[in-house]
Every structure is written in structure tokens, then in C-alpha cells.
Amino acid sequence: MSASAESSASDTGNATNASALDLDALAVSDRFRLFNFTRRDDHVAYLWVLRALDRLRAVHMVQAHSDDVAQALKELGGIHDEVPTLDGRLRERLDALAEDKMLHRLEDASRAGSLARYRNRQSVYQFSELGYRAFTAVEDVLGARIRDANLSRLVFSDILDDLRALAGATNQNDKDQVYRRLSRLDTVLDDMSRRAAQFHLTLGEIIRSTDTSPDTFLRYKNALLTHMTDFMAELDRYLPRLAAAVAAVDEEPMFRLAAEADERPFLSSGDRYDDWRRRWAALRAWFANANANDNANANANANANDNANDGTRESRAEGLRTATRAAVSGVIALLRQVTEAQRGGVNRSSQLRHLAEWVFSAPDEGSAYALMSAAFNIRSARHLGGAHDDAEQISSRVAWWDAPGVEISVTLFRRGKPPTPGVPQPARASPAIKAELRRRQAAERHAGRAAAERLLRNGAHDRILDENETRVLLRLLTLATEARTVVAGRLTTATGGNDVLTMRLVPSDQGSAVMTQNGVLHLPGFTLRLEPARR
């Protein structure tokens, strides 16, 4: 519910949101400095200093001396008991606010009535534009009240009258009236969006906190259901007429007339035209259906297209009606749940009270801790970690979430203890196995030597080689091919040998072949030449 209402409330301020997204990290950090006073130890004192400056600003005293701020604080102290005593540190706080760019600090020599005062600092302070917005944002948060949330159902008749008057003024080329009606519609829609978002957020908080305070919900359930039902009935009655009134407005002449009547000096005519077109796109998205939006796809820019001209989406008013209807269903379901819980006498509050009694009546501290651990599933956290095998492959700037994992031993994961090599195992002597391995090795060497002698004596061609002779030939062939080189683009002679014979690979156009028990080994471009090994 709250997500839909927030999305509806954000449509009218889409241009501001887009410009906020365009800020780089340095600009965002610079603007966050405006809220530094809320994180100071004496943040309440800073808040009252800013309230004193705002009080002076309300009487058109834009630039104020520290004495003027002190006098305003004294006046506020006579009205509110919460005003703190600054103990002569007012100028220090004003300078800190100036460093955070909440205030502008200027030197005004005309305030010096004597030479001594002239030699002293005569600083005056005034709100910066962004500083005043930060202050009002904090004040809005502090001044928010849950009981102020409501859905404005009486505003639909005023919107309908303004839309019809806007269409008439556009047809008559009355630019002043067009500007007044558009400005009023923009303000009214912004207020309605804010109220809808605030109402659904507040309703969500009430539903989430009902388990601990059902009395508040039961006290206002009838008024809440009546309020939402009346709002939906009024919205259903006016929505078709509002959509027809939006479709009856001639848009392009309206944008031109509004831009001509707009008196903002810091915007060009084209900027004012685009600004009113974006505002109208947000207004049209509230009440016009998908078919009405197809008519404006060629005129709205990218921001307006994202918000108003998507024909697959329902209008914002219809989305608000859907969210409100879902809220009514949620309130009715919650009412049934609360009623059944009170009828049975078991809810989260009663469960927590019984648990507190059990913990209080536990015989010792260990039993109380075990009971709380079992109730809330509290277990000791085990943090595992280790170093990567090749730490140089991982940058120190990589976040732990993106870094590759490290293998953790089972003993460290299950018992929290690092693995150990264990007790050294005794060396075991196996003379029989060693003697058998030596005998096999000697037999293999004798068979290989005998095969090499037969190969040297009988040659490698015109006969079939046995297994041992083939094994010796392949080993020598491997050594020869690894040692061959290329000179002037041609392969030269390669040599491989052992302690019995030496095998040479001699380049040949015909090539050669060697027959073995497992098949024929072809050597294209080479012939084999066997020679006794050199001693």
C-alpha cells in the first residue's frame, strides 16, 4: 500500500528527483554537510539557533547579528521552556553553521559605533538557500504528526472546476488565467499526493504496531474505514469527469500561454515552456487513461514519457483507488485478527508478558539466559575467516562480497578450532616390499637393455618389433623430436639415445615406417638411423 502511494506522490516532483540523481558524489557529500548540526552533541541548541534566525527572517530581517539572534532566543525562551541556555557560545555555533554552509557569514562595518567595536568582528549571518531548505526539512520531520494524515476527498470538485476553467481560458487566449489555474492545479495535486503518501505510510505503521497497541487501532477503526470508503466513493464519482476535462484541454497553446505569463526571471522562455509541459504531464498521468495518453506521446519529453505516457499503466488516481481498496481489506482482516486475539486472550503482548514472568521466576541466571535464548533463537555468532592462497591476485579495494571465497576446514567450521597436523606417525620399515620393488626395477632395466641391443643389431625396419623394442624406440623417438631444430625453414637432423644405442632422425622425401605388434608407425619426412652409443 505504501509503495503505491509513495510512487504516486513522487510523480509531481519527478524533475527534482531526476536532477538529484544527476549530482555526483562530491556534490552529494557537500549537500549532506548541511545536516551536520543534527549529529552534533548539542544538536538541540543548534536547532533553536536556526529557529531564532527563522523568526528574524519572518520579520524581513534577512541579515542578523549575534546580538539579534540572542534577543530572538530570549523571546523564544519566554514562550517555550525548552529553549536551552547557550552560555556565551552563540557566535561559536553561528560560525559552525556557516562552515557547514547552512548560513552565510558577512562582515558589516556599518554596525560599528566606535573604533573599539570596529576593530572587533562585526559579522552578520543569513540563511543560505540550501541551508534554509535543510532547516525546513528537519522542521517538517519534527512537526509531523500521525493524526494529521488524511485523504482529501473534497478536493476533486475544485480540480474539476479548475480544469474546465483552464480549458476555457486556453480557448480565449487568457494567459494570466491559464497561469493561475495551472499553478493552482499543480499546488493542489502536490498536496493531494503528499497527503495520500502520508496516509498510507501512517496506516502501514498502525498495522505493524497493532500487536503491541491494539487499543489505538480499535479506537479509530470505524472512523478509518468510513474515511477510506468515502474517499473511494468520491474518487469513483469524479474520475470519469476529470479524465474528460483533461482530454478537453488544448495542450500546446496552454503551454505557450503559461510560459508567457510565467514571471520567473532566471528561466528562459524555452525552459519555462518545458517546465509547464512536465508539470502537465504529471497532472495528466493522475487522471487520464491510457487512450488519452496516446495523443501526447509525440510532444512530451523523456521525463514526461516515463511518468505519464506509458499506455500499459493505469492512471495514478486509479492506482490510488486500488491501494486504498487494498488498505480497506487489510484493515478489515486486521480487525478480525485483533478481535479473535482478544477473544482468545492470546496475542503477542500476552505471550511476552508470560515469557517475562517465566524469566523472572527462573531459579538462576543460567536458566534465564537459556530460556531467552530458546525463545528468541539467540546463538553465539561464529566468525570464520582465512587468507587466500595467492593474496596478490585479489585487490585490496575489492569488497568482501565480490572477493573469491576461501576454503575453511571442517574442524574450524564445526568446533571453532583450526586444524592441526596431528600426532606424527611412526616410520614403518617394509624390507620385503622394498626388495620386491628393487627386483622388478632390475628386471625392467635388463629387459630394456636387451631390447635396445636387439634393436641395434637387427635394425628397426623390415621386421615387427615386440613390446619392449617398441617401448625403447618410442622413448628414443620422443627424445629426438624434442631436440630437433629448424634452420632456414628446414628441419635438421635430430638425435636421441641411451647407454646402448643412438637414434638419428634424418630428413628424407620418401619418409619411413616401422611395424610393431600394435600397428604401423609412420614417420613422414624422416628415416631412422641406429648407431652404437658413444663411449
Image (cartoon, rainbow, N blue to C red):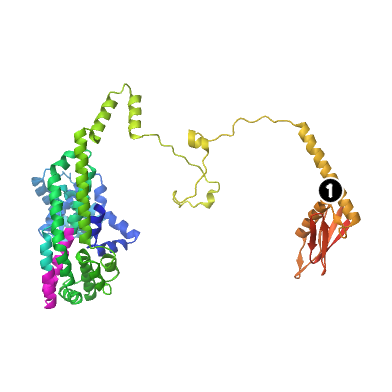
> Extreme top residue here?
363
Residue 152 seen anywhere in this rendered image of the structure = no
**What are the residue bounds of the magenta stretch?**
163-192
Q: Is residue 349 above or below residue 400?
A: above
| Nearer to the camera, 85 or 330 | 330
Number of numbered markers: 1
Instruction: Left or right? Give the position of 389 relative to 473.
Output: left
Q: Which amino acid does label 1 sit on?
A: Gly
Q: Does the magenta stretch include residue 329?
A: no
Characterize the magenta stretch by its predominant secondary structure: helix
Q: Is mark 1 on a helix, strand or loop?
A: helix
Q: Percent x, y for residue 503? A: 84, 58
> Extreme right residue here?
457
Q: In this view, does 250 lie above or below 338?
A: below
- Give the class, few, some or many, for how many residues have Cα within 10 Å of label 1's Cα (few <14, many ≥20): some
Residue 385 seen anywhere in this rendered image of the structure = yes
**Quadrant housing residue 303:** bottom left
Residue at the (80%, 52%) spot, across then down = 471
**Quadrant housing residue 502:** bottom right
Q: In this view, does 303 lie above or below 37?
A: below
| Nearer to the camera, 341 or 55 | 341
Q: Percent x, y for residue 166? A: 13, 71
Instruction: Left or right? Give the position of 491 relative to 5.
Output: right
Residue at the (13%, 44%) spot, across then down = 220
Q: Percent x, y for residue 242? A: 15, 66
Residue ID for mark 1: 448
Q: Percent x, y for residue 439? A: 82, 38
Residue at the (15%, 74%) spot, across then down = 261
